[in-house]
Image (cartoon, helix red, strand yellow):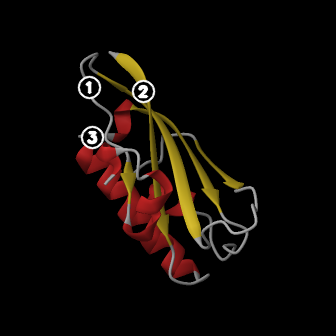
Amino acid sequence: MRLFALRGANQVTANEGEEILAATGELMRELMARNELAPDRMVSCLFTATEDLDAEFPAVAARNLGLDRVPLLCAREIPVPGSMPRVIRVLVHYYAPEDHEPRHVYLGDTQALRADLESAQ
């Protein structure tokens, strides 16, 4: 087994708790599905949110998916002028077999953030 890092993002429709949880849940479910990733192989998850999202912690959605034994942390994204608004990002550290190919996930309009990653689309 080897330690891998996985990235992903999703855009939230509005700064409302339910919307943040829905967008984060969708992102985490897709990351886990594409990478056949079970909670017991996850080491940690770091979530960031743009400064226009403060109605809920994205980590709550991960806890709702059963990641209750995975260390989770939420942080604020750097407010770069002109950057995409209402974005949740995640960095997941996990163990997988040596030959594993990480499949990053950028949903909806956030695909533009990493159009260079074919595996992210």
Q: Residue 35 — which label?
A: 3
Q: Nearer the viewer, residue 43 or 83?
A: 83
Q: Residues within 10 Å of mark 1 (few under 14, many from 20)?
A: few
Q: Residues within 10 Å of mark 2 (few under 14, many from 20)?
A: some
The residue wearing badge 1 is 100
Contact between labelled residues 3 and 1, with CB atoms less than 8 Å apart: yes
Compared across the picture, whether 70 is left or right of 99 comes to right
Label whose residue precedes the other's in the sequence (3 or 2): 2
How far apart are the alpha carbons under marks 3 and 2?
11 Å
Q: Quadrant of residue 46 in the image?
A: top right
- Disc 2 marks a residue whose amino acid type is Phe
Q: Residue 29 appears at what percent x and percent y? A: 32, 57
Q: Residue 52 — which label?
A: none
Quarter of the image with the C terminus is bottom left
Contact between labelled residues 2 and 1, with CB atoms less than 8 Å apart: yes
Q: Residue 96 appears at what percent x and percent y? A: 31, 24
How far apart are the alpha carbons under marks 1 and 2?
9 Å
Q: Residue 14 appears at what percent x and percent y? A: 56, 84
- Disc 1 marks a residue whose amino acid type is His
Compared across the picture, whether 12 is left or right of 37 comes to right
Q: Is residue 12 at least partly visible in the picture? A: yes
Taking the spot 25% from the left edge, 46% from the top edge, the residue there is 34
Taking the spot 67% from the left edge, 65% from the top edge, the residue there is 50
Q: Nearer the viewer, residue 59 or 106?
A: 106
Contact between labelled residues 2 and 3, with CB atoms less than 8 Å apart: no
Label whose residue precedes the other's in the sequence (1 or 2): 2
Q: Quadrant of residue 101 in the image?
A: top left
59 lies above or below 71: below
How far apart are the alpha carbons under marks 1 and 3?
9 Å
Q: Residue 82 appears at what percent x and percent y? A: 69, 69
18 lies above or below 32: below
Q: Secondary structure at mark 2?
A: strand
